[in-house]
Each structure stands twice: as C-alpha cells, then as structure tokens.
Image (cartoon, rainbow, N blue to C red):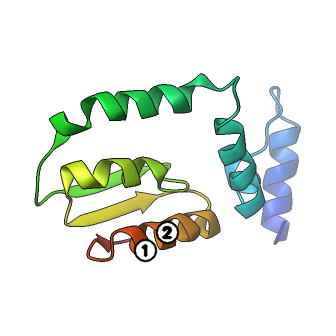
Amino acid sequence: MSSKADGAVFRESLCADTPSIPNKYIYDLLGSKLFDAICYTPENYLTRTEAAIFDRHSEEAAGTDTTLIEHGAGNCAKAARLIPYIRPHQYVPIDISTEFLEEGVGNLRSAFPALESKK
C-alpha cells in the first residue's frame, strides 16, 4: 500500500459484508504474471476456447485501417493472434497492471514494428 488512502480503501473493502480486495491491489506485475500462468493450466478452459475461436474465425475479421482496442489486454497475446488478420493501423491496449502491459506491448512491438500503439 502506498498511502493512507490506500489503507483506508483496503480496510473498508475487507470489513464489508462481502470482504474483497480491489483489483488494483492484486494485479501488479507479479499478480498479473500469476493470472497469466493460471490461464494456461489444464483446468482453465477459457483461454483455450478463446484461442480456438480466434483460430477458426480470425479470417472473418479481416480488414484494414482499423483501431484495435483491447480491454484487459494483459500480455497482448490475443492481439498478437488477431493483428495479422485485421491489420489495424493502431492498437490501444487497456489493463490495470501497467508494468505487465508494458511487457506485453514491448513484445508486440517486436513482432509488429509498424503498428502504432497507445497506452
């Protein structure tokens, strides 16, 4: 926690009828990497299902001169699968974990150097 205000939010959240921790405290760099690893476990079918849908239908999304906006971009893996098909001129990733997002965007820039990205 970085401030008294953070401490107050944390206490309030944990003392609520349904205790919780706000996402911004969970999805730091380490938390995001942990979530990313969980996504690839055998028990987590959602990531594999999304990948199968992308593989099956990416060509249908083909286009040019678009902007790809991705909420919850994380490691930018979904964008990396779609970019060759939709050929956006700009990519706008959004994620709560800035450090993890920067890593993903860096990898994406290496793979697609001509793509403009905004964060």
> Does 65 appear above or below 61?
below
- Quarter of the image where one finds residue 2: bottom right
Q: Tell me the element at label 2.
A: helix
Label 1 and label 2: CA atoms lie apart by 5 Å
- Say left or right for 107 vs 58: right
Q: Which residue is outermost to the left?
A: 64
**Percent position (x, y) of residue 65?**
11, 61
Identify the residue at image location x=69%, y=26%. 42
Q: Quadrant of residue 84?
A: bottom left
Q: Amino acid at mark 1?
A: Ser
Q: Which residue is mark 2?
A: 107
Query: Does residue 116 appear in this view?
Result: yes
Mark 1 crowdedness (10 Å alpha carbons): few <14, some 14-19, many ≥20: few
* Labels 1 & 2 near each other (Cβ < 8 A): yes
Height in image: 38 above or below 43? below
Left or right of residue 71: residue 75: right
> Residue 119: in sight, yes or no?
no
Say which of 24 and 80 sits in front. 80
Residue at position x 62%, y 61% from top? Answer: 97
User: In the drawing, what numbered circle is on residue 38?
Assistant: none
Judged left or right of residue 44, residue 17 is right
Amino acid marked by disc 2: Asn
User: x%, y% of residue 99?
Assistant: 63, 69
